[in-house]
Image (spheres, rainbow, N blue to C red):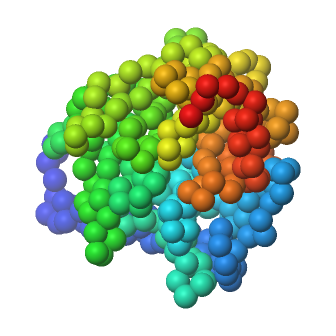
Amino acid sequence: MEGRSFPGMDREMNKNILIGIGCLLLALAMALHSSQVDFPKLTGPYLGQKPPGEIAQPFAVDVFSRYRGVHSNVFFSPDGNEAYWQSDIGDGSNYQGIFISKSENGIWTNPQVAPFSSLAKGGLDDAPFISPDGEKFFFLSGRPMKEGDQSGKYNIWMMKRTGDGWSCPQPLPQIVNSITGMHWRLSVDRKGNLYFGTWKPHNDGNKVTGNIYCSRYKDGEYSIPEKLGPEVNVSVYNRSPFIAPDGSYLIFTGSEPPRLNILYICFRRNDGTWTKAKDLTNIIGRDGGCPIVISDGKYLFFLDTLDGKPKPFWMEAGFIETLRKTESDII
């Protein structure tokens, strides 16, 4: 009887498979719903949170405590009416995606998986970033670049603002996405110049290295990405660059074991070179990853551990201008 199926066996097997898929989707939907039914009523800027001072504070604990962790920080659109972040769905299943909450009539909506993203085990989409003019949306994704692509390589994708929201995601040109090991946050300045980091795990499993690159944008085209110099790539593992909208400074995360998340800042000189990276630990008061200065320049957001999980923190960003005044021959 080996290799032979009985009448109705295939139909029953297909039925069971469909039931299993349906149960999985229902479980995910119920988990996502359960994480939203108790979402607090939040009004006002920045998810309705009380602004911090010069000392870093956890951001929106009542919002992000429901998630196991936030991977690439919360990002606000330039008009302040949309918040995006990458996280799990809060049920311990490790299904992750890019979430969105909007300020509608002054009230922030329950977080939903963004229309362009999808839930995936371990995460498929990451690092949301909107250009300073609000017209382009960039993110990292391990989705296939073309039919049959099973590489799983993360690449940079982009959408354009439309009257209905965002256009369909499209990968950036191969001249950018040919770089291997793209990881963590990316950012662009007002000119469209693109900054991103790479990572390379080593065979021993305990060592990771990485550098920050820039691809210039001119006449509608990207240039070959160039690794920034030793003034920026100062540590073993450099990543998560945030470029100021005017290109005048760069904040990023570096690793110098045993410290894994050190925030640094560099300022651009008039000749286009960078000042030596300055460790911000004494100013921040703690370690930090995935730095972002929101569009109005008031606050610095970064990730740090809270209750054993990566969560967003924020603080006033006025120290940047104070540091700028200590440098000479800079923009």
Q: Which residue lies furthest to the bottom in this view?
A: 105
Does residue 201 show up?
no
Number of marks in the image? 0
- Place residue 179 in its image quadrant: top left
Front residue of this view, candidates 74 and 78: 78
Front residue of this view, candidates 57 and 279: 279
The residue lying at 18 percent from left, 42 percent from top is 146
| 109 up-or-down from 285: above or below | below
Task: Tell me where residue 288 appears, x and y as whole percent.
Answer: 72, 38
Q: Quarter of the image for the N terminus: give it.
A: top left
Task: Tell me where residue 65 appears, x and y as whole percent.
Answer: 72, 61
| 252 up-or-down from 140: above or below | above
Task: Tell me where residue 186 appears, x and y as whole percent.
Answer: 47, 40
The residue lying at 68 percent from left, 50 percent from top is 300
Q: In the image, is 167 to the left or to the right of 73?
A: left
| 307 up-or-down from 261: above or below | below
Task: Tell me where residue 218 appears, x and y as whole percent.
Answer: 27, 37
The residue lying at 65 percent from left, 19 percent from top is 276
Front residue of this view, candidates 129 and 15: 129
The residue lying at 60 percent from left, 84 percent from top is 106
Q: In the image, is 184 to the left or to the right of 153?
A: right
Q: Quarter of the image for the C terminus: give it.
A: top right
- Place residue 140 in its image quadrant: top left
Q: In the image, is 321 to the left or to the right of 30?
A: right
Does residue 59 show up?
yes
| 152 up-or-down from 309: above or below | above
